[in-house]
Amino acid sequence: MTQARRVRVTHPRTEAARRAPSRPLAREIDEQTHVGEIYMRSLIRSQARLALTVCVAATLLLGGIALAGTELGRLTSWAPAGVPLPWLILGVLVYPAFLALGWYTVRQAERNENAFTDLTKRR
């Protein structure tokens, strides 16, 4: 009985230079390498942009109410339910606006963090 000769079957790229094993991005961030710093800077920059946007919105909201109170003096004489209008605006209407601003901040911060997590998992 004759024995068949074995043949080695390979892909042409098998002999090509091998890629260096990729390091997980979490390790890059933990070890504070240059790549990890770039990724962290992008997350911090997006969170700082969000914080600045929220601070500007809160300042405009409160500043607008204060400006409206000084410029529209005739509104101070109007008192629905016995409460002067400026007190009503500052005491009641500001809180829903700040709650909405807080909801927006949390939603955007979570969106930034989820985008960062997706970015790190894709690598």
Image (spheres, helix red, strand yellow):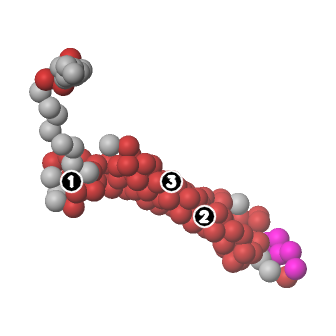
The numbered mark, 2 or 1, whose residue comes first in the sequence reads: 1
The numbered mark, 1 or 3, whose residue comes first in the sequence reads: 1
Callout 1 crowding tier (Cα within 10 Å): few <14, some 14–19, many ≥20: some
Per the rendered image, the range of residues in magenta is 77-81
Mark 2 or mark 1, whichever is nearer to me = 1
Q: Which residue is mark 3?
A: 111
Callout 2 crowding tier (Cα within 10 Å): few <14, some 14–19, many ≥20: few
Task: Please name whichever residue, 123 or 100, is drawn nearer the observer in this view of the structure.
Answer: 123
Q: Which residue is mark 2?
A: 103
Q: Is residue 24 visible?
A: yes
Mark 2 or mark 3, whichever is nearer to me = 3
Q: Which residue is mark 1?
A: 28
Q: Residue at x 21, y 53 (%)?
A: 28
Q: Residue 74 placed where, x, y %? A: 76, 64
Mark 1 or mark 3, whichever is nearer to me = 1
Task: Please name whichever residue, 24 or 78, is drawn nearer the observer in this view of the structure.
Answer: 24
The kind of residue on which mark 3 rests is Arg
Q: Secondary structure at mark 2?
A: helix
The kind of residue on which mark 2 rests is Trp
